Amino acid sequence: MLCLSLLVLVVDNTVLNLAIPKLISDLGASPGDIQWILDAYVLAFAGLLLTAGSLSDRYGRRRFLVIGLVFFGGASLLAVLVSEPWQLIGARALMGVGGAILMPSTLSILMTVFDEGERRKAMAAWSAVAMVGVIAGPTLGGFLLDNYWWGSVFLLNVPIAAVAVLAAVTLMPETRSAGRKIDPVGVVLSIVGLTSAVYVIIEREWNVPVIAVAVVALAAFVVWERRSPHPMLPLELFRNRNFSGASFSILLMSFGAGAVMLMLTQYLQFVLGYGPMRAGLALLPYAVAAALFNGVGAALGQKVSNRILVSGGLLVMAGGFAVLATTTGYLPLLTGLLVMGVGGGLAGPAAYASLMGAIPMEHAGVGSALNDTVQQVGMALSIAILGSVLAGVFTASMPEGVPEAARASIGDAFKLGVVEPAKAAFTDAVHFGSWVGGGFCVAAALLALAVLRPSAPAAAEPEPAQV
C-alpha cells in the first residue's frame, strides 16, 4: 500500500519528463513554460512538506495519506482538461500540494509499522517500487504519447491513486504521535520561508524583496524552533552525524543528477531520434539495475556499515556519469545507466536507514518530510542553476551564423530547421552536465565517508537526547 502511494508520484514525474517535446510542439509551451510546468510542482511540494509531515504526526499518517491521494488524483484530472501552458502550470501546483500532503506519510508509516529487524528490507522494497515507477511511467507514458494527445499521460495517475485510497482505507492501520502539539508559528514560518527560497532558486533573479522574505522567515523559523517547547522541526536532529551526513549527501547527489537526468530524456528523443515510448524503454536498464541492487544493498546492510555502502554506491554512480560524459550513442549510454543504477541501488537503502534511524518515532512524519524536502530542494537547485548552465553550454556550442532564436533551446532549433548543429551542441551540454553530476556524486561520497558513523546500521543507534 505504501509502495502504491509512492508509485503514483514517481510515475507522474517520469512521464512528465518524457512529455516535454510534446508539450513544446502540441501545447505550444516555451522553454520558460516548461521550466514552470516542472517547478510549479516543486515549489508547492517543497514549501508544504515540513508542515504536512508535522500535521500527519499529530492528526494521523493514514488520514493525510488518503487526503493527499484524493487531492493529487483530482488535480491530475484537471491537468487532462487544460488547453494553455499557464493552466497546466496551475494544475501542476495543485498536484504539488497533494504530493506534499501524501509523501511524508509513506516513509513515516513504514518507520512506525515495521520493527527494526524488518525496516531495512521495507526501505529496500520502498526504493525498489520507486524504480518500478521509473519503469512503468516511461513505458505506459510513451505508449500514450505515441498514440494519444499529451494530456493522456496524466490519466495514469487517477486509477493508481484510486486503488491506493481503497487499499489505505481497508488495509492500513492509523498511526499518530500521542501528545504531539501543533506549532502554528513554525508552520507559517516554514511555509513562507521554504516557498520564497525555492521561488528565488527557480527564478534565478536578484529579487531583493523575495530574498529578504526568505532569509527573514527561515532565520525566524530557526530561532523560534530552538526556543519552542513543542517545535515542529527538532533542530537537535542535525547534531546527529548519521542524520546530517545522509541529508547533505542526498542533497549533493540530487543537485548533481537532477538536470542531467532531465536532459537525457530530451537527448534520446531530439538527438537519437527516439519516439516517446522507445525513449522510455531505453531508460529501463537504469531502473532495473537500481531495483535489483536495492535488494543487494539491503542485504549487505546487515553486515556492512551504512557509511561504506553510501559512499561506495555514490562513487559507483560517479563512474556511470563518467561513462556518459565521454561517449555518444545509445550503447555507451546504456552502460552508464546500468552503472548508475547499481550505485544508486547500493547507496539508497543505507542512506534512508541512516537518516530515518536517527529520528525518534514521534517525529517520523517530520523526518520523512525533511528527507523529501532535501531531495526536492536539490532537484530545484539542479533544474534552476545547473539547468541554466547547461543551456548556456548549448548556446555557446552552437556555430556562428545560425539564427539567434535557434540558440535558445534544441526545440527552437529544430523548429527553425537547425538540426545537426543543435544535436552536436546538445550532446556537448549533456557531456558537460555528466561531468558535473559525477563530480557532485564524488563530493557526496566524500561527505558521507567523513560524517557518517563507521558503525553498523544507523537504525541501531540510540535516538538523540532531548528531542
Image: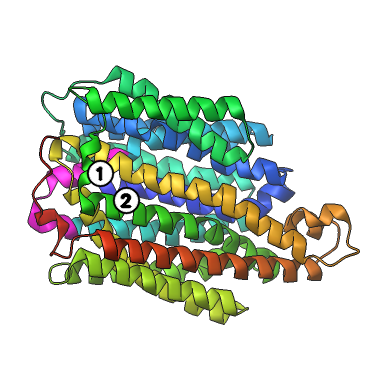
How packed mark 2 is, by other alpha carbons closer than 10 Å (few <14, some 14-19, many 20 or more), is many
Give the tally of numbered discs. Answer: 2
Q: Which residue is mark 2?
A: 247
Task: Find residue 162 and report its horizontal and vertical position in percent.
Answer: 36, 38
Residue 238: image tag: 1
| Residue type (three-letter) at the residue carrying disc 2 | Ser
Marks 2 and 1, the one that precedes in the sequence: 1
Q: Which residues are magenta?
A: 104-120
Q: Is residue 108 magenta?
A: yes
Q: Residue at x 80, y 66 (%)?
A: 419
Q: How is this picture coloured? A: rainbow
Q: Is residue 190 magenta?
A: no
Residue 381 relative to residue 424: left or right: left
| Residue type (three-letter) at the residue carrying disc 1 | Phe
Whether residue 196 is visible to the viewer of this picture, yes or no, is: yes
Task: Find residue 154 and report its horizontal and vertical position in percent.
Answer: 52, 43
Q: Is residue 407 above or below residue 305?
A: above
Q: Is residue 309 above or below residue 80?
A: below
Q: Residue furthest top?
A: 184
Question: Mark 2–mark 1 contact, CB under 8 Å?
Answer: yes
Q: For numbered disc 2, what is the local secondary structure?
A: helix
Dividing the picture into quadrants, the one containing residue 254 is bottom left
Task: Find residue 71 and report its horizontal and vertical position in percent.
Answer: 41, 30
Residue 423 relative to residue 248: left or right: right
Q: Is residue 390 above or below residue 105?
A: below
Q: For numbered disc 1, what is the local secondary structure?
A: helix
Whether residue 292 is visible to the viewer of this picture, yes or no, is: no
Q: Residue at x 40, y 29 (%)?
A: 218
Residue 16 relative to residue 21: left or right: left
Dividing the picture into quadrants, the one containing residue 30 is top right
Judge depth for marks 2 and 1 and give the one in front: 1
How packed mark 1 is, by other alpha carbons closer than 10 Å (few <14, some 14-19, many 20 or more), is some
